[in-house]
């Protein structure tokens, strides 16, 4: 993937943005890297179906349905909550021929139990099982390639964190010495650092990393008028389109850290735009913005 880098001004400083949203097919972003080796593994195992989990606005299920269809897999999405025919994300999943299996929030907590997986296998036959968010060791392996071809003279790299596989892959980039800060977008994910630590265990790490929990705004996709205004400002001042759940918070975090001098003016900074622009249709639907 040829790197596409855009330079923006944040707090009177030039900051580079790696546009995965522009580099990957269909603007899929980081999910492209997370899925790549998993799809290969499914093929190698001779499996025709891939099953995974997510919420009704999941970028992961969205990406899986698109790539899965393209690559000739039957995809099955186990979705938390109830069906809603008006939800544009679910409509996209169906248009990509993903079979949707709805379960209650309560049952969703048991989604990793062996007995639950067995019941799904009885119903759908054998499938390649991808955990929620598509995050497993093969996803991390794929994300180690996100920085491929990027000149590695950055002091500091910032990237959004949901389940942690992407930031783990960045940290485990071969030869990387830049400091990496993951910006958590979920609240109450205290175990995230341990998850990342586990993901990077197989690799030699030459860099320092941390996860900041200061910028999640109270949780996943929580409506916040200030963030919306901020997104408009980034767009107007820098011609950079960001998504409401992930990358906008990374830009905001970087500006705040510059302001607080937690990132120095002389440091070379790279933000990773992980994609997720499909999230806008779901966001606008949820909050009834037209
Ligand atoms: C899924 C997603 C992330 C988070 O990736 P994880 O590997 O779950 O941490 C970041 N940005 C975007 C746009 C995403 O869709």
Image (cartoon, helix red, strand yellow):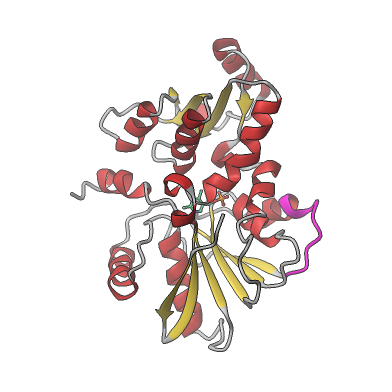
Q: Which residues are magenta?
A: 199-207
Residue located at (49% from left, 35% from top): 67
Residue located at (58% from left, 47% from top): 33
Is residue 76 positioned above or below 32 on the image? above
Tell me where residue 34 appears, x and y as whole percent: 59, 45
* Quadrant assignment, res 197: bottom right
Residue at far front of view: 2
In the image: residue 45, left or right of residue 225: right
Tell me where residue 167 appears, x and y as whole percent: 62, 57
Q: How many marks?
A: 0
Residue sitting nearer the eye, 252 or 192: 252
Residue located at (65% from left, 34% from top): 40
Asked if residue 206 lies in the magenta stretch, the reply is yes
* Quadrant assignment, res 169: bottom right
Report the quarter where the N terminus lies: bottom right
Is residue 220 positioned above or below 111 on the image? below
In the image: residue 232, left or right of residue 120: left
Is residue 50 positioned above or below 139 on the image? above
């Amino acid at each position: 993937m040829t790197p596409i880098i855009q330079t923006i001004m944040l707090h009177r400083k030039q900051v580079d943005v790696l546009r995965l949203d522009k580099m990957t097919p269909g603007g899929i972003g980081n999910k492209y890297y997370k899925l790549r080796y998993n799809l290969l593994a499914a093929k190698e195992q001779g499996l025709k179906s891939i099953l995974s989990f997510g919420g009704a606005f999941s970028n992961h299920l969205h990406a899986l349905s698109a790539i899965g269809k393209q690559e000739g897999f039957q995809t099955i999405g186990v979705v938390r909550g109830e069906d809603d025919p008006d939800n544009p994300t679910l409509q996209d999943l169906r248009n990509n021929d993903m079979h949707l299996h709805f379960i209650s929030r309560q049952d969703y907590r048991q989604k990793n139990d062996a007995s639950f997986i067995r019941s799904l296998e009885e119903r759908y036959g054998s499938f390649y099982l991808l955990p929620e968010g598509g995050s497993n060791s093969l996803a991390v392996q794929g994300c180690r390639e996100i920085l491929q071809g990027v000149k590695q003279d950055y002091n500091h790299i910032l990237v959004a964190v949901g389940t942690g596989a992407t930031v783990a892959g960045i940290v485990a980039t071969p030869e990387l010495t830049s400091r990496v800060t993951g910006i958590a977008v979920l609240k109450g994910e205290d175990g995230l650092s341990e998850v990342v630590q586990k993901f990077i265990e197989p690799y030699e790490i030459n860099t320092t990393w941390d996860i900041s929990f200061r910028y999640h705004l109270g949780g996943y996709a929580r409506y916040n008028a200030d963030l919306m205004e901020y997104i408009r400002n980034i767009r107007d001042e820098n011609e950079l389109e960001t998504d409401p759940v992930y990358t906008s918070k990374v830009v905001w975090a970087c500006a705040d850290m510059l302001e607080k001098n937690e990132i120095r003016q002389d440091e070379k900074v790279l933000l990773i735009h992980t994609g997720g622009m499909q999230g806008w249709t779901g966001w606008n639907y949820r909050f009834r913005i037209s």
